[in-house]
Amino acid sequence: MDDRNPPLERLRFLAFFTKNTDEFFMKRVGGLKQQIDAGVTKTTPDGRTPKEQWVEVLDAARPLFTQQSAYWQSVLKPTLADNGIEICTPAELSDENQAQLRTHFEESILPTLTPLAFDPAHPFPFISNLSLSLAVLSSTGSDEPTFTRIKVPPNQPRFITVPGEADRYVLIEDLIERNLDLLLPDLDIRDVSKFKVTRNAEVRRNEEVAEDLVDMVEDVIEQRRFATVVRLEVDADMPDESLAILKDQLEVADREVFHREGPIDFEDFFELIDHDRPDLKLPAWSPKPHPRLGSVTSEASDETARIFDEIKNGDILAHHPYHSFEGTVQRFLNAAATDPDVLAVKAAIYRTASDSKVIQSLINAADNGKQVAVMVELKARFDEKNNLEWVRQLEEEGIHVAYGTVGLKTHTKTALVVRQEDDGVQLYSHIGTGNYHSGTAKGYSDLGLLTADRDIGFDLTKVFNFFTGPTIDDRFRKLLIAPVTMRERFTEMVRREAEHARAGRRARMVVKVNGLEDPSMVEELYRASMAGVEIDLIVRDICRLRPGIDGLSENITVHSIVGRFLEHARIFYFENGGSPEWYIGSADWMTRNLDYRVEAVTPVEDTQLREQLRFILEASLTDNRRRWLMQSDGTYEPVSSDDESVRDIQEILMTATEAALDNGYGPGMIVDTDLVEEELLVEDAAETETDASPEGSNEASSDTDDEQTYSDGGDASAFDVYADHWYRPDSETYDWAVRTAEGERRYFKTRDGARNRLRTEYE
């Protein structure tokens, strides 16, 4: 835990840790247990069977939960109390406060509780997934104790405000325990312990034989309710009698029991983070309008048309949450719904908000006579129910809805608008890295490209036809589409960098993804490293590759950034011997993304937008506040700022976004070159040189230092004097390369640009 973060930000991290580990146990541990129950013994690439993985995962997770509880009890809870936010037990309150809370319990909480006894007359109650419960042992005197389960109502606030003291709280489970005599009168309460159950979310489904995908998904949701228990969290002092009942009835092994000190479930602690205490949080950030779209404030037809005109004038790169989702993507869809010249709107939805304005825009488009087709992925885990509801609403509006593809998940974040214009039908596309979800767009760092590129539009047309038709056309002009062309193209580009390195040309790759797990891509990266390619991988989550191993991966560095925003964008940079290629899109380098999902990755070709991406990557690679480096053994160490000035990638991007808006800088972020090191190729650098020659400047030109003509084809003495510091690169784009005093390389299209850089560096 980083104590430099304000207290409520650290509490947010504890809550996210619970949320993420809950999902990890439901998905990953649940999947392993499912394989074990099925008798699977096949080993993974690292040589482990499902049983061995299961054991190691549980053993590795246990100390993490211990650390979470200890940090709350010994550090964060006292820190919050020192700052006026106190979490108390009822016993710590005055008699007056206890009486007031007892009245609140009796009037507002007690009616929602249902005690469920377990005895010969009552079967063991069903325990729902992730529910927090009280296990009560009670008796009428000398009788054997009876086990009673009381579910903590999930629709009640977890934190109950102490009357008259706005910043003091008690946990609802503690208040229930304190007043059990009102719920279980005339009983001797022998023990009260809390517990929480986690169930498997990896329910088997056979899409090949399913007659109706909607029915199948509904069955999956129902089966998940009663799935196998994969984890049981209990109070550290739960008596053996209660624990034995839970283990027996829930069929839980000893290894699956996690004893917790203090609160069991921290996810509800998000309630405290919403507290109006800005002094205990990072400064609030409000997403900004994109400079090129900020002036469009009206929904009138002439204003909506301006959005399409703006996109047609040049691609727009939106970077959330720095740029507003509502002011970019949502505005694009709103315009499509209301513009009279729009003929059709198509969108692929993986996850969206429960009150989605994106869906409403699509409904409005249909109401306005547009042809609307929507791909809603019903198999988006944990969003199946929400997506089913949207499917029904869309279909009720007469909109054609595709549910997905058999055997594949549709993970693309794409939209296509078809518009009739004076010069014919124009295609407008959006390809993003994040979901069409206004909520996550405020907390996830994602990119989206708005473009009128016809090749991209034609490619998206084929993708949407695949969603509704029987087959897919694999002849794409620009987009990389999984599972059709993406793996092959990425593999080709990695191998191409290796060939550049072997030929002595500059070879460089920077890949920013959420996960790197695919064995084949890992092997390709190892081979590229051995060929001499300099590789930086910015991986937020799982990374199978190990960097810094001599003879294998000494040219690979693995970074991970943990900040206020979740790093979710995927960016791919290939230097390609001086003719760089840039891509963004929905896919990680994981087997599921490359082979079992429909994904879309688009090239970014506009030079100014490439400069934006370069800025993002360079600021990431030089961050000394939020960045961690993977060691060769797979562990991570934080990057220390030492005596350097702090470089926080997300703070840098917020500042750059505000500066662009203030100055009307169209690309979206003003690049502050003083804050980053120019590690990646700066394109069109010569165009900024003060004495750059006009077009055709590779011809000989006058040099006042020396009028002698030299063998390089020019007449400037700088090229002979500094002959060891320049060369002609093997590039169709750049004719000159200069080695800087720091050992880096800068590429130029013009001879004068290279000459000026030589003089700047060495004279």
Image: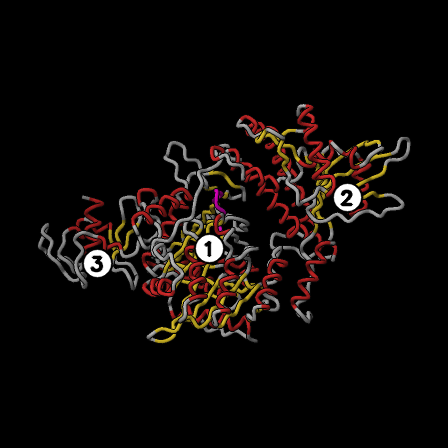
Observer-nearest residue: 630 or 689? 689
Q: Quadrant of the C terminus?
A: top left
Q: Which of marks 3 and 2 is in front?
A: 2
The image shows residue 343 at horizontal and vertical percentages of: 44, 73
Q: Distance between the residues labelled 3 and 2?
A: 79 Å
The vertical placement of 500 against 162, above or below, is below
Residue at horizontal 9 percent and vertical 55 percent from the top = 708
What's the residue type where badge 2 is placed?
Thr
Earlier sequence position, callout 3 versus callout 2: 2
Identify the residue at horizontal 10%, vertical 50% (top origin). 705
- Which of 103/763 is in front? 103
Query: Which residue bears the numbered disc 2?
Result: 114
Magenta residues, start to end = 561-569
Identify the residue at horizontal 79%, vertical 33% (top origin).
Answer: 181
Query: Residue 565 magenta-drawn?
Result: yes
Nearer the observer: mark 3 or 1; the answer is 1
Q: Which of marks 2 and 1 is nearer the N terminus?
A: 2
Task: Name the spot of residue 6 as percent of width and height, x first.
Answer: 49, 34
Give the secondary structure at mark 1: loop
Secondary structure mainly formed by the magenta segment: loop
Residue position for label 1:
570
Under mark 3, the amino acid is: Thr
Q: How many neighbours does mark 1 have within 10 angstroms: few (below 14), some (14-19), or many (20 or more)?
A: many
Q: Position of residue 412 (x, y in %)?
A: 51, 62
Where does label 3 land, which residue?
750
The coloring applied to the image is secondary structure
Q: Are marks 2 and 1 in contact (CB under 8 Å)?
A: no
For the residue labelled by badge 3, is the local secondary structure a helix, a strand or a loop?
loop
In the image, is residue 38 above or below residue 624? Answer: below
